[in-house]
Image (cartoon, rainbow, N blue to C red):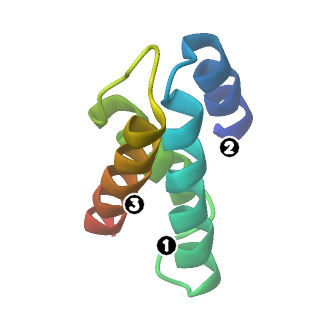
Amino acid sequence: TFQNLALAFQAMEKGGNMPCILNAANEIAVQAFLEDKIGFLAMSDLISECMSKIKLIQTPSIEDYIETDKLTREKALSYL
């Protein structure tokens, strides 16, 4: 039911900027949960949505990581 561990393994397997996407989405999801904006199980949905919508960059530069973090946070917030 709670898919966060599976999503973490998926991010590790894909590599590139995917762990960055997972981290940024998770931070937004946890904050939203703590503020009672989403339910516990909805955190996985939010993270999964971001992982499926944000472009995978296999060999990201530091600029790519910064942009990925920004885009993921925007996407996660729009999901709320």
**Which residue is label 3 attached to?**
73
Identify residue type, mark 3. Arg
Mark 1 and mark 2: Cα distance apart in space: 14 Å
| Amino acid residing under circle 2 | Phe
Quadrant of the snapshot with the N terminus: top right
Residue type for callout 1: Ile
Residue carrying label 2: 2
Looking at marks 3 and 1 on the same chain, the residue that comes earlier in the sequence is marked by 1
Residue position for label 1: 38
Residue 41, given in percent of the width and then of the height, sits at 59, 56
Side of 30 where 65 appears, left or right: left
Q: Residue at x 64, y 37 (%)?
A: 3
Q: Which mark is residue 17?
A: none
Q: Residue at x 55, y 40 (%)?
A: 20
Q: Residue 43: x percent and y percent?
A: 55, 57
Disc nearer the start of the sequence (3/2): 2
Q: Please state if 36 lies on the left or on the right of 56 as rendered.
A: right
Judging from the image, what secondary structure is the residue with disc 1 in? loop
